[in-house]
Amino acid sequence: MQESIRKMPKIVLHLHLDGSLRPETVQQWLQEKGHTCDLEEVKRNLMVEKDCRSLNEYLQKFDLPAQVLQNKEHIKTATYELFEDLKKQGVIYAEVRFAPMKHTQEGLTCDEVVASAIEGMNMAKEKCKIDGSLILCCMRGDRVLDNKQVVDSAKKFLGRGVSSIDLAGAEALFPTKDYEEIFNEANIKGIPFTIHAGEADGPESIKDALRFGAKRIGHGVRCIEDEELIKTLVTTEIPLEICPISNLQTQAIQGKHPIEELYKEGILVTISPDNDTVSNTNIIEEYEWILQNTELTEKDLIQMNINAARFAFTTPVKKAELIAKIQEYQNKENKEFIK
Ligand SMILES: [Zn+2]
């Protein structure tokens, strides 16, 4: 690993809590419930193989996390541990997302799930000196009533741990256009949002997300199929939360990943790992993948972090602080380079 990548102050905007659990912790929870399982078996249930090229295989890895994240303590611990891990990777600010309704199967309310995650995040903020917020995911295929509960929880905790909402799930089966009502409500309530679009579905999905008022697009890589859409994303300054390794695993992209082309077209590219555990990755590995597989450089990665800071769902003051930290690093690195 290049030391400079580890030291670079990094911002992560697209990371799923349930896809980023520590296998050791999941093993411990299973053992407490009386299951005997070795760590390798737990890992096989949580992580895709290195050569994963199927969305089905990818999605199966979220079954076990949903089973174990059904009480306050586990949700709190999982959130704390993820922020702790991010700090070790040199992340200064992270927006961690999850679908609260997935965790209401054994009696918790949506608000209780969210409050538990906030508690874990706040503990990490205090102990680990990392900053961040939570994004609540509405789910494709869920009942409108359930998704409205997520919007209500987001409104309740907005600015107090929650920064925004998202739409996640099987994009090809449940098209973005069917979710206008939810995002109308978010607009009325003043909740900003990002939407997973242009991952398993094409450019139309991204256009629908933009029409609803999405401020960022999760993945969005399939905008590469539509030149006009690329221009729109550039002129309207809508960043993409690109997760290269996940895109290859789920086959959102077949063949060469378009990240370099999109960046050079002027799109506001940001980089995230999507799911640290399921994808068997982290933000450092994503950066290394980019440096090894494209012509992009560390300077470009710094620019992508500035993009992420500018479009994070946070206050102008916090954005300015994040940008200052990145620029401070950039100036120091340049000096070292000149020496
Ligand atoms: Zn995602």
Image (cartoon, rainbow, N blue to C red):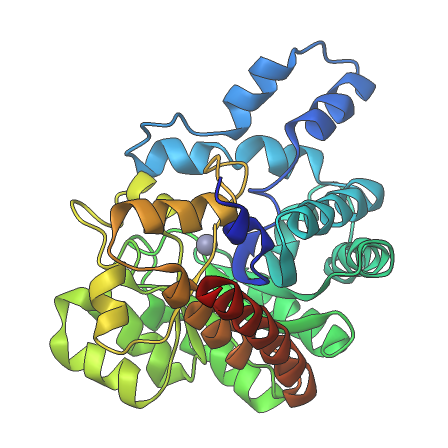
**In the rendered image, the vertical position of residue 71 relative to residue 197, given as above or below:** above
Q: Residue at x 40, y 60 (%)?
A: 298
Q: Residue at x 51, y 52 (%)?
A: 5
Q: Residue at x 67, y 11 (%)?
A: 37
Is residue 88 visible to the viewer in this orientation of the structure?
yes
In the rendered structure, the answer to whether residue 104 lies left or right of residue 339 reads: right
**In the rendered image, the vertical position of residue 94 relative to residue 160, given as above or below:** above
> Percent position (x, y) of residue 208?
31, 77
**In the rendered image, the vertical position of residue 269 relative to residue 78, given as above or below:** below
> Percent position (x, y) of residue 163?
65, 74
Q: Residue at x 45, y 32 (%)?
A: 60
> Percent position (x, y) of residue 195?
43, 68
Report how many numbered discs are placed on residues in the image.
0
Image quadrant in which you'd find residue 207 = bottom left
In the rendered structure, the answer to whether residue 336 lies left or right of residue 133 reads: left
Q: Nearer the viewer, residue 211 or 327?
A: 327
In the rendered structure, the answer to whether residue 74 lies left or right of residue 320 reads: right
Image quadrant in which you'd find residue 204 = bottom left
Q: Nearer the viewer, residue 201 or 151?
A: 201
Is residue 202 visible to the viewer in this orientation of the structure?
no
> Percent position (x, y) of residue 182?
50, 75
